[in-house]
Amino acid sequence: MLKKSSRLKKKEDFERVFRHGKPLFFGDLGCRYFFHEKAFRVGFSFGKKYIALATKRNKVKRMIMGVLLEKKKIWPQGGDMVFFCFKKAKNIKRENVVYLIEEILKKIV
């Protein structure tokens, strides 16, 4: 589990990332990243439209958080990142999430 200080919670933070952040898309998942000087923080925005069951949405969030914690050594110094779905996610597997996180961190670091 990510620390509270490593998570995005406020609506204003999410809006800033979606408005000014750079988009990256891989398969069914995407993310937006916004650089700043503070600590690295992560948020999730998975709507019912794309992943219907709350249990599946939570499972995807836990998978992404777990992979991010494994890759903590290569996190950027500062910035906010929001993960989201942009089309119906049929089958999101851990291998795909690991590849996604590695590619995203390579592009932004």
Image: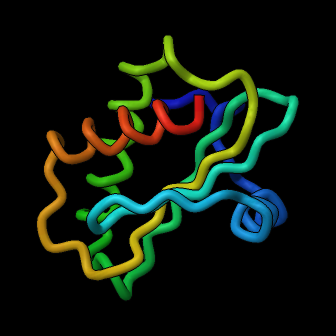
Depicted 105 relative to depicted 92: above or below: above
> Could you tell me which residue is drawn at 45 percent across and 30 percent down?
1
> Could you tell me which residue is drawn at 69 percent across and 31 percent down?
40
Depth check, front residue: 37 or 49: 37
Q: In this view, does 34 lie to the left or right of 74?
A: right
Depth check, front residue: 50 or 28: 28
Depicted 9 relative to depicted 56: above or below: above
The single residue placed furthest to the top in the displayed view is 73
Q: In which quarter of the image is residue 19?
A: bottom right
Q: Is residue 12 left or right of residue 104?
A: right
What percent of the width, then of the height, locates residue 22? 65, 58
> Could you tell me which residue is drawn at 70 percent across and 44 percent down?
80
What percent of the width, then of the height, locates residue 69? 43, 23
Q: In which quarter of the image is residue 7?
A: top right
What percent of the width, then of the height, locates residue 103? 38, 38
Depth check, front residue: 103 or 10: 103
